[in-house]
Image (cartoon, helix red, strand yellow):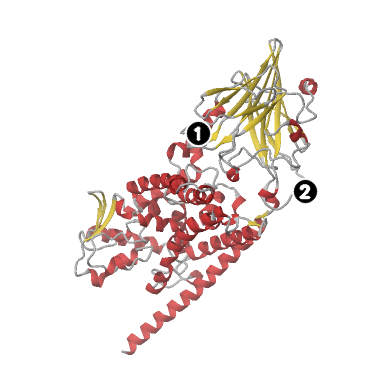
Amino acid sequence: MSLTITRRLVQVIAFVVMVYGIGLGGYYLADKFSSSLPALACAYDLQTADHCSLVSFQHQMDHRAAPVLSSGGSIMEAFLPTLITLGTFVVLLIILSKAFCGWICPLGFFQEVLSLIGQKLGLQQTESLSKETTAKTRPVKWLMMIFLLFVFPLLAGFGAVGHELGDPFCRICPSRILTTLATGDPKELVVDTSTMGYFMLSVLATFLFGLMMSIGLMVRQPFCRICPMLALNTLFKKIGLVRLVKDAKPRCVKCGLCAKACPMDIHEIHTDMENKDVIYPDCTLCGRCVEFCPDKDVLKMKYAFFPILSADPAYFKKRKKAQTQWEKITLFGSKTFGSKKK
Amino acid sequence: MRIKAKTAVLFFLGTFGINHLTYAELLWNPKPVKEAESKIKSSNTGHEGHAGHQQNRSKEKAFYLEDNQNSTARYITPGLEVIPLTAEEKGNKYILPKTGMDNYHALVAERKTESTHESALRYPYMRGKPSGHSPDKLVSDSKLPLEIVPEPMIREHWRFYSSNKHDYKVLFEEKPLKDTWVILQTSNGSKMDAKTDGDGKVNFTLPEDFQDIKPGRRANKPAEFILRTVHISDGITYKTNFSAPYSVNPSHWNSNLGGILSLSVGFLSGIVIMRRHNNKMNEEKKNNKNSRRAS
């Protein structure tokens, strides 16, 4: 079984647990499980078995850090809950590293499904975004993390900005709409007219969700590229047990199949000839680069010291053939809906 | 027979005068009677829920037990530790001890005579460190001979909302009580009743009975609802109630149609962006091909 099929199975199971978890383990499985998963498992979904740590960070800034600091409390007192959440987050990151994004996140899985739908509908797929486009989008996730997770919630807690900005990322996060809709609950697919702030945020959220859906049909993982979870995971990537290592060979310069296979368009994985550790900030540890590397042991995915998958010519041939056959299957043939001729 | 049973329940409840929310009846109230009566227009009832982010957390939390003569009260933690409660001297105010635990706790009051057993139940949400226990454990644990059990208790980040349907189970000595009338009354003046099914289950859609609704959750104070039931066994009349706050349904200021419209605009914008992008890419490919041919 290929790594991608294994990953798909894990994603489906994770999606069911994350989105419909209470049906599996009771109403408060989250209490037993963890309360701050490093993946977008939305707390607004009332059937979820867990929730994303991003909501905790925002609430802790707004409801804890700012009130404690403004009443003259110590920094330790203000940020202790944040440190506890961060501790849980880090423990889980040690276990799975950034693979939370590529293997667990319900929104990441949804975008992969969108991409599959787009391909099956015969829509023209953008294999790789240009270096210029990726260079422009990369800083966005860091800005999202700094401002939406920490700065605005803290300012809202101090009363410097409106309460609407107390949890600004959750307000615009597509996972909030996706996971609630997946449980048959349309309460988050709304425009909130209670205040101008909520109105703007709800319009932005629904617009962004629609935008992500249509772009996701033709470009791989559009929202992941700007997701603050990716940025947060990147901060602790060095301590994760899942590793992606490269032993560059001269042939790598001309090949570039790994970069083409990468859903996040990390061109460096192809061009970097020096670093052994190739978990780049945008990497979600999906392992496609290893699968599509045709040279023996050039790319390897490891769990601590144990190999998960190593690049192998035989595996590559089999995988490439399977991919080609899979891509040939479209619902309306290859020419419909403006698709390019294969 | 059906009419008789209902009449009996209404008679007993009527005896205890439930036409008013704060009548002489064992009942947990988040405000003293006078304030509760002037209610609801000005009260902040129901703020014990998780929603109380803006509350002063160091401030003590208290509840008022109406008609508390000869009654006993206890407080149960998420881990099922029972703490006896005593009212403040010459009063009916019960200050909840700090347990340091987050999540729902139970407030239980009982009064027994030879022929009656009265009880009141409520689940205040307390702030603290994660309790390590599922609220299901507390809610499903038998606390009273006759008990109204919310199925399930509303989850963190959620509330009882008007227009929302909720299920409850009536248990007598831990067994489902079928064909039993349950009466729902709200502090906004609504009243309705329903009968439990074979599994002791009953559901109510909380009435849409708020007046002068303003846009936004914070602009509307929650109201109270009370579920009551009566059961007679071995010559003893058991009466119990379950009370909780409920809020204005956000659908008053949230528009699904607007959401779908905005989503559609986003979707179409994405198509336009991708169309332009693909045209540009195809053009570039074509030019590259031509230049290669020319060279």
Circle 1 or circle 2, nearest the eye: 1
Residue annotated with mark 1: B100
Which chain letter matches label 1?
A: B
Left or right position of B272 against A7: right
Residue B87 appears in view: yes
Q: What element carries label 2?
A: loop
Quadrant the C terminus of chain B occupies: bottom left
User: Quick one: label 1, few (<14), some, or many (20+) residues within 10 Å?
Assistant: few
Residue A246 place in picture, x, y as percent? 24, 61
Residue B191 place in picture, x, y as percent? 77, 33
Left or right position of A180 against B39: left
Which chain letter matches label 2?
A: B
Amino acid at circle 2: Asp
Q: Nearer the viewer, residue B276 or A225?
A: A225
In primary-sequence order, the first of circles 1 and 2 is: 1
Q: How far apart are marks 1 and 2 (CA)?
A: 38 Å
Q: Do labels 1 and 2 share a chain?
A: yes
Q: Nearer the viewer, residue B46 or B137?
A: B46
Residue B184 place in picture, x, y as percent? 73, 32
Residue annotated with mark 2: B212
The mark found on residue B154 in the picture is none
Amino acid at circle 1: Gly
Q: What element carries label 1?
A: loop
User: Quick one: label 2, few (<14), some, or many (20+) residues within 10 Å?
Assistant: few
Left or right position of A28 against A163: left
| Residue situated furthest bottom in the rendering | B294
Residue at 54 percent across and 46 percent down: it is A45
